Image (cartoon, grey):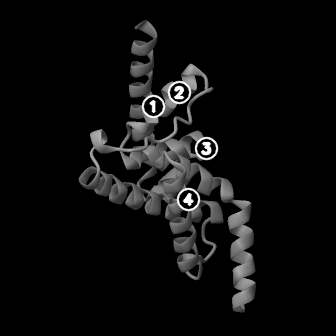
Amino acid sequence: MTTPELQDRFQALVEEHKKILYKVCNLYCRNRDDRDDLAQEIVVQLWRSFGAFDGRCQFSTWMYRIALNVAISFYRRETTRTRHVISDDERLLNAIDETAGQSDDLQLLYGFIAGLDPLNKALILLYLDGNNYLEIADVLGISETNVATKISRLKKTMKREFSSTAQA
């Protein structure tokens, strides 16, 4: 395949699955500039890795795997940078609250997800996006049993937190 054909195929696949990119960026970044930076990094890494995509899995699974790995690395790097560069007291601008206008239940869910570590964030994103345990395991590189266990624990924790919030 020639380079222009490869580029056209890549662009078509990314365009077809761009919602994955939006979901990952929105989950790992609170402000628009960070989301834009992360999206750019993901697309660059997808392009760099595209030659190795062999079609043994669905493109969406492969894209999730790369997008989540880049997002987790980005999140860790940005968290460390922010912690060492700007304290919360010195912050000039705060991220816009994008939960305004959302239902209380949805705000609770987003709040719960925001408190998760990067792996569990990825896990819950894939689960809520309708992926089955095997697909989630493939994307995250963990066993299907591990996925089932982690999701079960997350559901129990969420149920406990939400029921205590409702009682308060």
**Few, some or many residues within 10 Å of mark 2 (<14, 14–19, 20+):** some
Residue 31 placement, left or right of 16: left
Residue 137 lies, with reference to residue 9, above or below; the image says above
**Residue at image coords 62%, 26%:** 101
Does residue 46 appear left or right of residue 75 in this picture?
A: right
Q: Is 123 situated above or below 59? A: above
Q: Which residue is mark 2?
A: 107
Front disc: 4 or 3: 4
Q: Nearer the viewer, residue 47 or 159?
A: 47
- Callout 1–callout 4 Cβ contact below 8 Å: no
Residue 33 lies, in percent from the top left, at: 52, 55
Q: Quadrant of residue 4?
A: bottom right
**Image quarter (top left, top right, bottom left or bottom right) of the N terminus:** bottom right
Tag 3 residue: 129
Q: Is residue 58 visible?
A: no
Q: Nearer the viewer, mark 3 or mark 2?
A: 2
Pointer 2 with pointer 4, Cβ within 8 A: no
Quick check: 159 above or below 166? below
Under mark 1, the amino acid is Gly
Query: Which residue type carries mark 4?
Result: Asp
- Disc 4 is placed on an element classified as helix
Give the percent coordinates (x, y) of residue 24: 54, 52
Q: Nearer the viewer, mark 3 or mark 1?
A: 1
Residue 40 % position (x, y): 55, 66
Dot 2 or dot 4, earlier in sequence? 4
Looking at this rendering, what residue extends furthest in the left direction? 84
Residue to which mark 4 is pinned: 36
Kind of residue at badge 2: Gln
Asked whether the residues under the numbered discs 1 and 2 touch, taking CB atoms below 8 Å apart as contact, a structural biologist would say: yes
Q: Earlier in the sequence, mark 3 or mark 2?
A: 2
